[in-house]
Image (spheres, rainbow, N blue to C red):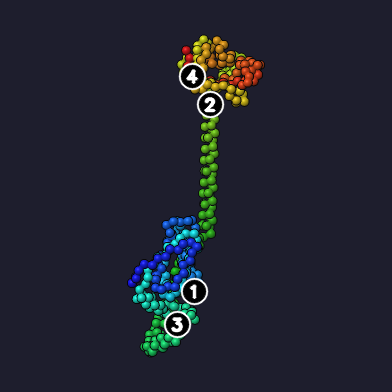
Amino acid sequence: MFRGFWGLKIEPGKTYSQTVDASFRLSNAALGLELKDKKRTSVVLTIDNMNFVLCSLTPGSIEQQSLDICLTEGEDITFETVGDNEVFLTGNFLSPEEDSDEDSDDDVDLSSLSPEQIQELIDQGLIDPESLLDEDDSEDEDYDSEDAIEDDRIQEITEKDESDLEEDEKEEEEEEKPKPEPVAEVKIKKQAKKAEKRKAAEEAAAAAKEAEAASAKKAKKEQRKEKSDKKSLNLQGGVVAEIKKEGTGNGVKKGARVGMHYIGKLTNGKVFDQNTKGKPLWFRLGAGEVIKGWDVGVAGMKKGGERRLTIPAAMAYGKRGAPPDIPPNATLIFDVRLVDFK
């Protein structure tokens, strides 16, 4: 019967020593609410100058451990922890009746122990050898001739049963042994497996080759389509107009006012001018309001159409260029789009 609650809070780096004044049972160890780190903390109990690790607690893995340890009145004990987290020990005080019950539980059933275990208990002074002799004598007194006859019968039956059991085990082993397959059949099976593997490898190689051929065919088709979509026109003065997008409606003619979005670049890719959003650049086509390459390259474009104009220096800014952005004798590249025309 429990007499009351027992508990102890162990803080890191501190020891708690006492002489037990009332027997108690230690039933649980748990980590505190606030954890300083996630490393393991071990609970150590010292009795008679001997250290015993009761449990090890790890945050996120094992945060409490059930125990069943009885500490009796008069024992000198010390609790401490190894680690940085605080630990709470809990249990209950024991009534005198429970102490006596525990003493009675110390009786050992010798019939369940081996001779080596019994000898070890004798060496430790926990068993009196003479008491064992007394028990043997009392058992011998109850043994009579009828028991001896019965023992002979039991031994005879046991020996017979053992011989029958051995024969049954031999028969079962013979039945369980796999019968060897004929050599010819084994060779045929191996050859069949090899043929299956070879066939599977050939099929995989053929499928990969077919997929590769299909991919190459598709790439060629896309290249042809791309070439057909892009038409190049060789125009007056060496201007080359690559049509990227055809546009809709009628083509623009000389004298019309056209609105253009554009990006102007040198052959090295450097952008020197651009107008890609908002209000387009308006000029009258063929009136000399822009460089000659534009008058030639924009003619015939449709609304929404896009071209890349490659304009030699003679059709652009000539030998002088347009410093500082356009050097002398510079070939210019314009990506142009016809926004609208009137």
Task: Assign the N terminus to one quadrant of the image.
Answer: bottom left
Q: Which mark is residue 342?
A: none
Q: Residues within 10 Å of mark 4 (few under 14, many from 20)?
A: few
Q: Residues within 10 Å of mark 3 (few under 14, many from 20)?
A: some
Left or right of 313, for residue 75: left
Q: Which mark is residue 127?
A: 3
Question: Which residue is drawn at the image coordinates 44% and 62% (left, top)?
Answer: 87
Query: What's the CA distance linking mark 4 and mark 1?
Result: 97 Å
Compared to residue 38, the image places residue 293 above or below, namely above
Q: Which mark is residue 226?
A: 2
Query: What's the CA distance linking mark 1 and mark 3?
Result: 23 Å
Q: Secondary structure at mark 4?
A: loop
Query: What's the CA distance linking mark 2 and mark 1?
Result: 93 Å
Q: Which mark is residue 279?
A: 4
Depth check, front residue: 211 or 18? 18
Q: Secondary structure at mark 2?
A: helix
Query: What's the CA distance linking mark 2 and mark 4?
Result: 31 Å
Q: Are marks 1 and 3 in contact (CB under 8 Å)?
A: no
Going from the N terminus, do you reach mark 1 or mark 3 first?
A: 1
Q: Which quadrant holds residue 27?
A: bottom left
Q: Are marks 4 and 1 in contact (CB under 8 Å)?
A: no
Going from the N terminus, do you reach mark 3 or mark 2 first?
A: 3
| 4 or 1: mark nearer the eye | 1
Query: What's the CA distance linking mark 4 and mark 3?
Result: 111 Å
Q: Is residue 333 visible?
A: yes
Q: Which percent across, then down, holds residue 277?
A: 49, 22
Query: What's the CA distance linking mark 3 and mark 2?
Result: 102 Å
Q: Which percent across, then down, holds residue 161?
A: 41, 77
Depth check, front residue: 41 or 270? 41
Question: What residue is disc 1 on?
Answer: 48
